[in-house]
Image: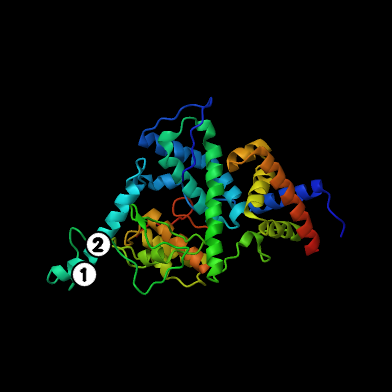
Amino acid sequence: MTDHLPDDLEERVRDAYQSAARTVQTLQRPSPMLAAGSVPRPRRMNALVPLAAAVAVIVVIGASVALPRLIPGASQNPAAPGPHRPRPTLPSSTTLPSSCTATLTEGNDGTITPLFCSDGSPNPAALAYYEGHNDRGFHPAVLRLAPSSTRSQVKSAMCADIGPGGTMGLQAEQQAYDLAARRNSWSYDINTVTNLRCPPAG
Amino acid sequence: MTVPIYRAGTGPQPDPSPNAARAAVDDLFRLHALGLVRFALVLVGDQATAEDVVQEAFLGLYRAWDRVRDTGAVLGYLRTAVVNGARSVHRGRGRARLLRVPYDPPVWSAEAAAMDGEDRRAVLAAIARLPQRQREVLALKYYLDLSEHEVAAILRVSRGTVAATGARAVAALARQLREDQ
């Protein structure tokens, strides 16, 4: 093999980049502004905010330890609904890699972030949320499908999820699909907003 | 995201109200998202992660909209945010490797079915083995076709650093490709 002249190599780099970029034909996720109603525009952080956050965390941890002991019966039915129902938490059996976070931010429409860990794998906390550890009644069928499911089966499950008898909104269902697709290595490119066509109900 | 996006320029000043911000960022997403995802793809190696990076970049733009003084500078800001997001991805992958949870991005894996051409795969695989900064310079220079001045602005380094890093990257790449033959 002969040496490549720099110009030749630069052309090969350009060509390789273009070829890789062409593998992206359409986006799998819609604009984040579709859910922007739930995306806060935080005020500028001042210097005391980190301190206040640390104090808040200490208070919450202290209260979670102390309150069940101080209030008779408080620990008997922790799942009971009420005006201050605790946020859904990760099952204690779930272990998180260091690249993931258990802290989910939940939007008004029930969508959450982050869906994925920084290494690209599905966030176990997000999976747990959509697999039932949520207080919105989300229980998407798309996350119960086997990895070998066909595109048609996936679409049917998604249509059932967002149909009249389903529990899911479009954005939440898209997140459930994104998680399932990543976990099962599907590349069906289904988007609830742009390309999922469901048969009319009834 | 703490990238300053104030820049005195000739572009129009944006309306800072929340609804206007949402509409403006949504328009920018429609205009630039596909291109930015492709750019992110050459940095992180798979579409899903690339889309995550770009989504975060647009959310960062939305949150910082009241600091935008020149909409003409927004694309540069988004590119910088994508580069920073890709760095975070690589840091996470580094930690995952320490935990023996390797993640091989599909674009530059040997089995990349979507990529045609052995040579292209070899070039991308060799690029993936370069240091982070060299990969960034190559992507900005040869994928986005930016000038050294523009690359320097996005990476926040001097133009000389860009030139030197680019030259080292090309030399290392040529060496690796020779060794791979």
In front of the other: B68 or B109:
B68
Q: Pointer 2: what residue?
A: A86
**Can residue A22 be seen from the camera position used here?**
no
Element type where label 1 sits in the image:
loop
**Can residue A91 be seen from the camera position used here?**
yes
Report which quarter residue A63 is drawn in: bottom left
Amino acid marked by disc 1: Pro
Looking at the figure, which quarter contains the C terminus of chain B?
Answer: bottom right
Report which quarter residue A95 is drawn in: bottom left
Element type where label 2 sits in the image:
loop
Q: Give yes or no for contact between labels 2 and 1 (Cβ–Cβ under 8 Å).
A: yes
CA separation, marks 2 and 1? 9 Å
The label shown at residue A78 is 1
Residue B16 spot, x, y in % from top left: 39, 32
Label 1 resides on the chain identified as: A
Amino acid marked by disc 2: Pro
Residue B3 spot, x, y in % from top left: 49, 41
Residue drawn at (34%, 72%) of the image: A92
Relative to B27, A137 lies left or right: left
Residue A121 spot, x, y in % from top left: 50, 64
Residue lying at the far left in this picture: please name it: A72
